[in-house]
């Protein structure tokens, strides 16, 4: 315990010395949960929807690395999620979309359409049917381009796009 505290102190000192970037960002404290209030949060707010035509309304999303992303995903159609289910699945770099989609179809509803316990996934919503909405919050990953898909069987061929993360 004591060693841990010392190590933490050193890390803090080193961290503050090494940081020459602009002003420091305020740190979010654990336990300070504003998730239910709907209060404005710092970071990026993204909105995406899917429809009964098996389409996302956007195929390009943007964010800045390290920012908190709040994504609101909406199914604006009317069809049931067993017929026209949609989700948002942000994949880690190097993930083969076709392979992932096949595995997602195999795990199906019982696995929330996310294979391999989500090891290839940065963030994802629930599978939604018409009229449903899900909101997720996650940290924007390091700069790069990331694929997102709907992992409902057969949908990733049309329902895919990229999240571009900049510095
Ligand atoms: Zn879909």
Image (cartoon, rainbow, N blue to C red):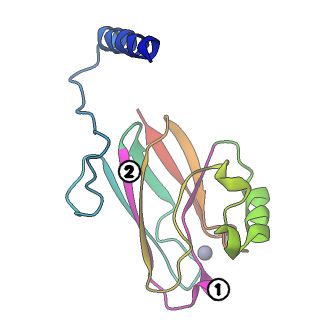
Mark 2 lies within 8 Å of ligand 1 (Cβ measured): no
Q: Residues within 10 Å of mark 1 (few under 14, many from 20)?
A: few
Q: Position of residue 6 (x, y in %)?
A: 39, 10
Q: Quadrant of the N terminus?
A: top left
Extent of the magenta region: 68-92
The residue lying at 45 percent from left, 54 percent from top is 61
Question: Vertically, is 158 above or below 44?
Answer: below
Disc sitting over residue 82 in the figure: 1
The residue lying at 67 percent from left, 48 percent from top is 119
Q: What whole-number distance in Å separates the C-alpha atoms at marks 1 and 2?
A: 28 Å
Q: How many marks?
A: 2
Question: Vertically, is 69 above or below 101?
Answer: above
Q: Nearer the viewer, residue 79 or 38?
A: 38
Q: Nearer the viewer, residue 29 or 44?
A: 29
Residue picked out by circle 2: 69
Question: Residue 66 falls in which quadrant of the image?
Answer: top left
In the drawing, does residue 24 fall left or right of residue 165?
Answer: left
């Amino acid at each position: 315990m004591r060693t841990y505290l010392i190590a933490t102190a050193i890390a803090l000192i080193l961290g503050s010395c090494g940081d020459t970037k602009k002003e420091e960002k305020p740190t979010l404290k654990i336990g300070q949960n504003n998730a239910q209030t709907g209060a404005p949060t710092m970071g990026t707010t993204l909105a995406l929807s899917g429809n009964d035509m098996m389409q996302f309304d956007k195929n390009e999303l943007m964010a800045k690395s390290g920012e908190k992303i709040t994504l609101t995903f909406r199914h604006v159609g009317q069809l049931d999620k067993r017929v026209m289910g949609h989700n948002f699945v942000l994949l880690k770099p190097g993930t083969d979309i076709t392979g992932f989609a096949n595995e997602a179809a195999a795990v199906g509803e019982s696995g929330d359409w996310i294979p391999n316990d989500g090891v290839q996934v940065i963030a994802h919503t629930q599978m939604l049917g018409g009229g449903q909405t899900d909101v997720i919050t996650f940290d924007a990953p390091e700069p790069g381009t990331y694929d997102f898909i709907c992992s409902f069987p057969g949908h990733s061929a049309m329902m895919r796009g990229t999240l571009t993360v900049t510095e």
